[in-house]
Amino acid sequence: MDEASVGLKPFDEPIYITRPLVPTLKQVTEKLKGVWQSKWLTNHGDLHRELEEKLQVVLKVRNVSVFNNGTTALLTALKALDLPQGSEVITTPFTFPATVHCIAWNGLKPVFCDIEPDTMTIDADKIEELVNKNTSAILGVHVYGLPCDVEKIQKVADSYNLKVIYDAAHAFTAEINGKGIGNYGDISMFSFHATKLFHTAEGGCLSYNDDQYIDKLYYLRNFGIKNEEEVVEIGINGKMNEIQAAIGLLNLDLIGEEKLKRKEIKSVYIKHLALLDGITLLEFPKNTTDSMGYFVVKIDQKEFGVSRNEIYDSLKQYNVFARKYFYPLCSEYEPYKQLKSSSTTNLPVANKIKDEVLCLPFYGGLGAVNAGKICKIIEYIKYRNKISTEVSV
Ligand SMILES: *Cc1c(COP(=O)(O)O)cnc(C)c1O
């Protein structure tokens, strides 16, 4: 059996994991007319305000503060919580570097907690044993939009008087029992980077229920400036400009249709891949909604017959560029690998899963036909290997 006999050939153009959602250029220029007329390009302009108001509705949360990117937003959230310098923040190693860097940049110490095998979010049952008198907060990540065990985390936080922050960068419009995911913990961060489902090219926001953070975050986001003569916080420049906000407002109108297209692709992936032994598909708990940001599979090398890395490499030969999110773990990065909590004995599940996960191309423009073809390629990679091992035996 060779490629030709199964009718497979590489894609003509590279297929990446995502492609940003974009409004038409005409829509963008139309939207920016007012901005050009007023010459108000940034500093809490009309579109900035409009986006914050719309996001409160879309995310079903009480307060939203938009930022120039998700990382600045998360840095600012941690700052706003006034955690004692040098105190410990319990977090997950299975995330994008920004999560952990935001802890360290605030002069806080990241402490890694292992993850839960099904949701791959921080294992709420293992948090308590990492708490000591220096612990000040828990930073969970709703990885791939799968919600953390928010109830259990809050329980631990309440018994030790800890703050809870969520990195909800992947979880735009995710819900738990119909409640917006940004309602949990003290503050949640959403990223609006171009690679995320909803984006403003670069951007992000914080959501929170406690009104005491409204002014605090407003000042922190804008150099601490309260008025022309008073600077009241050690602030940063985290403001979103009007061009970003314009793109965001236009994209808000597009995400409904984009999610429907992704839903179709997801069902194609599930239909084909569920038939292959050794592939585990991600399951969203019944009371939660998939925010349709990612399509992730776990590969069990023994059962599948081929490792995750081999699939990843072989897909490239077909012009398909999957991603190994999140390999390596944050606990393996140079600045963090020395930490006691980075040891593999502390993180057995994360260290296993990092070698199994693979994110497949997932965006509306991919189309159901191409998704089906990617499945065929994966099937072929498995089958080809089976044949060749049988022949060699
Ligand atoms: C994208 C991402 C961030 C960073 O957001 P930016 O808007 O790119 O700064 C943080 N955490 C996670 C989990 C992410 O995926």
Image (cartoon, grey):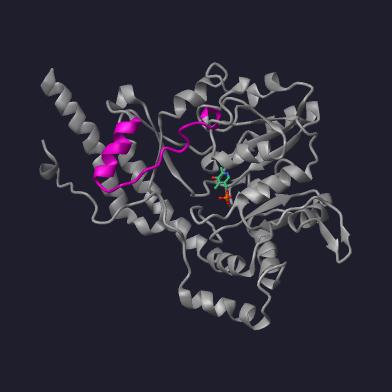
- Residue 375: name its quadrant: top left
Q: Where is residue 383 drawn, in percent x and y?
A: 20, 32
Q: Which residues are magenta?
A: 308-332
What's the residue at 63%, 33% (across, down)?
A: 149
Left or right: where 280 falls relative to 72: left
Q: Where is residue 297 drawn, in percent x and y?
A: 40, 36
- Residue 309: name its quadrant: top left
The front one of 358 and 33 is: 33
Q: Residue furthest right?
A: 229
Q: Residue furthest bottom?
A: 37
What's the residue at 34%, 47% (across, down)?
A: 268
Q: Where is residue 179 drawn, in percent x and y?
A: 66, 48
Tag count in the figure?
0
Q: Where is residue 112 drawn, in percent x and y?
A: 61, 27
Left or right: where 326 falls relative to 77: left
Relative to 87, does residue 368 appear above or below in the rendering? below
